[in-house]
Amino acid sequence: MSLSEINIREKEFHNTLQSKPKGRFENIFYKAISNCGEDFLVYLKDKAKNSEILDYGCGVGSFAEKVTKYSPRKITGIDISEISINKAKKKAKELNININYKVGNCEKTSLDQNSFDIVYGTGILHHLEINKCLDEIHRILRSKGNLLFIEPLGTNPIINLYRKLTPNARSKDEHPLIKKDFEYLNKKFIDVKIKYYGFLTLIFFPFYKSPKDSKFFKLLVVFDQFLFKFRLFQLFAWSVLITAKKIRRHFFF
């Protein structure tokens, strides 16, 4: 497996992270974008049946385990951290589910060309060189295949300040997505759709406990989605849900 300096640093960071008994303090904030995860799974549930799926940067396999319930033909998970992969394999064995986990470099996998109907990931692209990742995803997706990613944005100045003040909570090479990243995405794929999350739900996160049972959270989600219709408020979103499709090949004779 060929690794760049960035790949090596990311591997070391995530191996260290997975070796700790507790997760990062920042994990408490993720309830503010729990609706993003719900939309992510709804999308997968609609398209997963009889599909060959790749969990791109699968970590310990948390999402892959959920996707097995949607009757895919096959699920493969790839991650650069062997500790994460070993945890994922152990959990899959305990749950008696069939997921093909592999240690690998997401920027340059050993996977066959045109081999997946869906490639998805959560918080992986911003750890790597995104153009290389998109090129590789395009290579391994079948014609008219779908990609689906949850990624953080790098456009909210307050969140960016927090990131600068807490460097040990993230890897050195993280780069939440900005405008130019989406420009390359639009060059490589069609039907690109971006949905924004985490403005008011993040600001007011101390005022609700479980988003699932909170009417206040659901109200904030409604207001967020209204505000995100305007470009200014999109800049203050924490995360996005990205969907796109590989262009169908046309043959001329």
Image (tube, rainbow, N blue to C red):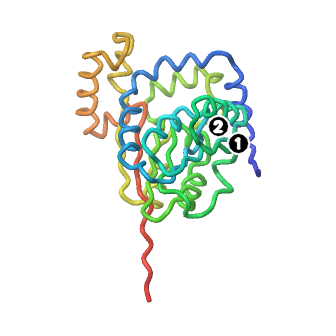
What residue sits right under mark 2 in the picture? 173
Which circle's residue, 1 or 2, is located before the other in the chain?
Answer: 1
- Local SS, label 1: helix
Crowdedness of circle 2 by 10 Å Cα count: few (<14), some, many (20+)?
Answer: some
Label disc, if present, on residue 110 of the rendered structure: none
Q: Quadrant of residue 71?
A: top left
Q: Residue at x 63, y 61 (%)?
A: 112
Relative to 22, 176 lies left or right = left
Q: Quadrant of residue 216?
A: top left
Relative to 157, 129 lies left or right = right
Which is more toward the observer, 176 or 111?
Answer: 111
Q: Quote the CA–CA distance across marks 1 and 2.
A: 7 Å
What residue type is disc 2 on?
Asp
What residue type is disc 1 on?
Ile
From the top left corner, tell me how far across and down residue 68 is, in percent. Answer: 49, 40
From the top left corner, tell me how far across and down residue 173 is, in percent. Answer: 64, 37
From the top left corner, tell me how far across and down residue 74 is, in percent. Answer: 54, 50
Q: Quadrant of residue 16?
A: top right
In this rendering, is residue 252 above or below 150?
Answer: below
Whether tag 1 and tag 2 are in contact, CB under 8 A, the answer is yes
In this rendering, is residue 236 above or below 166?
Answer: below
Q: Residue at x 47, y 52 (%)?
A: 118
Crowdedness of circle 1 by 10 Å Cα count: few (<14), some, many (20+)?
Answer: some
Q: Residue at x 69, y 19 (%)?
A: 20
Relative to 127, 239 lies left or right = left
- Local SS, label 2: loop
What residue sits right under mark 1 in the picture? 6
Which is more toward the observer, 74 or 162?
Answer: 74
